[in-house]
Image (cartoon, rainbow, N blue to C red):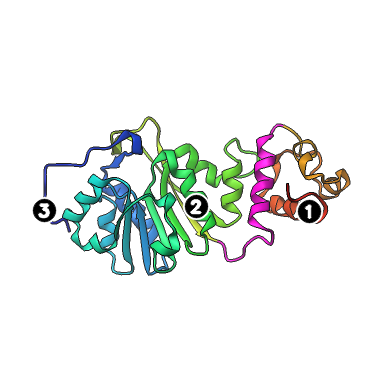
């Protein structure tokens, strides 16, 4: 699919957190994980670099591939080697752009995400979940595990609850460091997020605040960690939460707790 083989390559830039994937099998597996579940007309790849994943997306006629990269060198390289991508190639920062202006309608998101902004990418996805029903991405392994963690596990925390409140999460496979240029110091993990049909019946802002307050003092029992909400101990007692810590609550527990704060506590500053 490439236009021609050129010896000149884009240099990975440390300040952009670039680690270029160089294993074709892994790239094909990541693309396959999206293609298997994708129902959108459009797919957006973040940080395509030198296109090792991009070519497997472009090779599928079931959707139109877009890509965004903040690295000018990568954009120039992609324009030369994948001219069919050029009309849908954006040079810019995904985190700063208005997605409703960027993409024509709902779309699936994919990428080998830079470690230093990977959590920010997911938080932006959560804010735009009605437009992004599916995400397949590679993260630092520890972060990938947090998205999929369950209560009472050490990885379970803010990322776990907030992501799982709106998406079904799947940890798909682990990727070793040697398949990247340059190799990172840690392993990576590929996950898939599929938006849930039913949303929590509580405001996102309140749910986010409840979860963050609870986990910011995760060693404390909820009766102490949640004092700022001024929720009567009797309410927590009736719900069975009073002697529990944040790490013991399920996603549905946190949704219920947020509703209790909304109804009986001080939900706003």
Q: Position of residue 233 (x, y in %)?
A: 86, 43
Image quadrant holding the N terminus, namely bottom left
Toward the viewer: 172 or 114?
A: 114
Q: Residue 144 colored magenta?
A: no
The magenta segment is 196-219
Q: Residues within 10 Å of mark 3 (few under 14, many from 20)?
A: few
Which quarter of the picture shows residue 63? Answer: bottom left
Q: On the image, numbered disc 2 is attached to which residue?
A: 124
Toward the viewer: 27 or 137?
A: 137
Element on which disc 2 rests: helix
**Which mark is on residue 187?**
none
Which quarter of the picture shows residue 23? Answer: top left
Using the numbered discs, state the Cα–Cα distance from disc 1 to disc 2 in whole angstroms. Answer: 27 Å
Q: Earlier in the sequence, mark 1 or mark 2?
A: 2
**Which mark is nearer the camera, 1 or 2?**
2
Element on which disc 3 rests: loop
Q: Position of residue 136 (x, y in %)?
A: 42, 54
How many numbered discs? Answer: 3
Q: Earlier in the sequence, mark 3 or mark 2?
A: 3
Q: Earlier in the sequence, mark 3 or mark 1?
A: 3
Q: Residue 197 colored magenta?
A: yes
Toward the viewer: 249 or 260?
A: 260
**Which mark is on residue 4?**
3
> Residue at point 73% right, 52% down?
258
Q: On the image, numbered disc 1 is attached to which residue?
A: 260
- The reply, left or right, for residue 261 in relation to residue 92 is right
């Amino acid at each position: 699919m490439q236009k021609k083989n050129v010896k000149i390559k884009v240099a990975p830039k440390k300040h952009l957190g670039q680690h270029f994937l160089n294993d074709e099998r892994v790239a094909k597996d990541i693309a396959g994980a999206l293609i298997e579940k994708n129902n959108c007309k459009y797919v957006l790849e973040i940080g395509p670099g030198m296109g090792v994943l991009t070519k497997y997306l472009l090779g599928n006629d079931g959707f139109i591939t877009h890509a965004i990269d903040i690295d000018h060198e990568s954009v120039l390289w992609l324009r030369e080697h994948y001219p069919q991508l050029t009309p849908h190639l954006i040079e810019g920062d995904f985190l700063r752009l208005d997605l409703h202006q960027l993409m024509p309608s709902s779309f699936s998101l994919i990428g080998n995400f830079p470690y230093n902004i990977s959590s920010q990418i997911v938080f932006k996805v959560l804010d735009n979940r009605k437009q992004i029903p599916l995400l397949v991405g590679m993260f630092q392994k520890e972060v990938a595990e947090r998205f999929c963690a369950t209560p009472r596990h050490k990885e379970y925390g803010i990322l776990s609850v907030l992501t799982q409140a709106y998406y079904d999460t799947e940890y798909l496979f682990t990727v070793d460091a040697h398949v990247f240029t340059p190799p990172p110091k840690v392993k990576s993990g590929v996950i898939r997020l599929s938006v849930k049909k039913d949303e929590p019946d509580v405001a996102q802002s309140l749910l986010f605040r409840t979860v963050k307050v609870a986990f910011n003092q995760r060693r404390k029992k909820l009766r102490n960690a949640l004092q700022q909400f001024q929720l009567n101990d009797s309410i927590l007692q009736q719900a069975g939460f009073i002697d529990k810590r944040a790490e013991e609550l399920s996603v549905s527990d946190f949704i219920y707790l947020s509703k209790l704060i909304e109804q009986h506590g001080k939900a706003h500053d």
